[in-house]
Image (cartoon, rainbow, N blue to C red):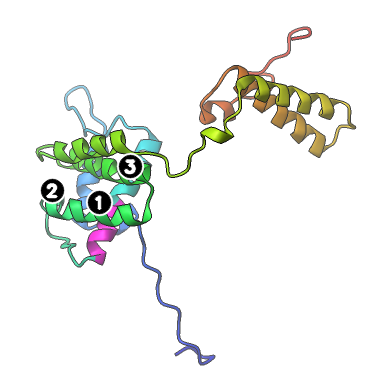
Amino acid sequence: MSLRGKPPRPTPVRLCWPVEQWPAIDREAWAQALTPGDPFAPGGLGAGWSKKTRQQTAGGYGRWLAWLHSQNLLDPLVPPPERATRERVSAYYRELKETRSPFSVQGRIQELGDALRVMTPGMKSAWISRGAGRLRSRARPVKDKRARLQSPARLAELGLRLMDLADREVVTLESAMDYRDGLTIALLAYRPLRARNLAMIACGEHLVQRDEV
C-alpha cells in the first residue's frame, strides 16, 4: 500500500526489451554481429547495416525476447538459436496476428530472422526469413487508402496555391510555414523523394534560386 492508502500501480510489462536488458549471451552475440572487420578479418554479418536497420532489427528481437519471457520460455543460459524452435516461432506469430496488422506481423518475423542470422551465422534460420517472405506476399492493408489518393497534378496545384496565398500575406512565422508546406507538397508531387532526403534539404545549399527559377 502507498502512503495515501492506494495500492501501487503495477509495473508495466515491456513489449520490447532494449539491448541492455537482453541476456548476456544475446548481448555478446549482437555485439559480435555488429563488430566491423579489417583487412584481415571479415567482421560481423551486421557490421554494414545502417543505424536505422540496427535499431529496427534490435527492436524486433527485443520484442521476441519479451514474448519468450511472458511465456516463461526465456532461459538466459540457452543460446539464441535453441530458443527459436518452429513451435515457438509459430506461437509467437499467432499471438502477433491477434493485435498487429499483417505488414507489422511480417516485419516482426523478418526482424527476428535477420537478428538470428547475424547473431548465429551457423544457424539454419532461413526458414524464418522464408516464412516472413510468404507473409509479405499474402499481406493486405487493413485500411484501403486508395479512395483517398490524389493525382500528382492536384497535389502540385494545391502546393502552388498555398505558396501563392502565403506570398500575398505579411511575412510571419505562420505564413512562412504555409509557404514551406506548399513548397513541400509541390516538390513531392513533381519529384518524389524519401522522407529522410527531403528533411536534409537546406535553403541556399540544396535549394537554390537562380534568376526567376
Q: Which residue is mark 3?
A: 107
Q: Quadrant of the N terminus?
A: bottom left
Residue 85 visible, this angle: no
Residue at 15%, 41% (x, y): give it. 120
Residue 194 visible, this angle: yes
Residues rendered magenta in the picture: 62-70
The amino acid sitting under disc 2 is: Pro
- Tell whether label 2 touches label 1 (CB within 8 Å): no
Of labels 2 and 3, earlier in sequence is 2
The amino acid sitting under disc 3 is: Gly
Query: Between marks 1 and 2, how big is the CA–CA gap?
Result: 17 Å
Q: Which residue is mark 1?
A: 93
Which is in the foreground here, disc 1 or disc 2?
1
Q: Which mark is residue 81?
A: 2
Of labels 1 and 3, earlier in sequence is 1
Residue at 48%, 39% (x, y): give it. 144
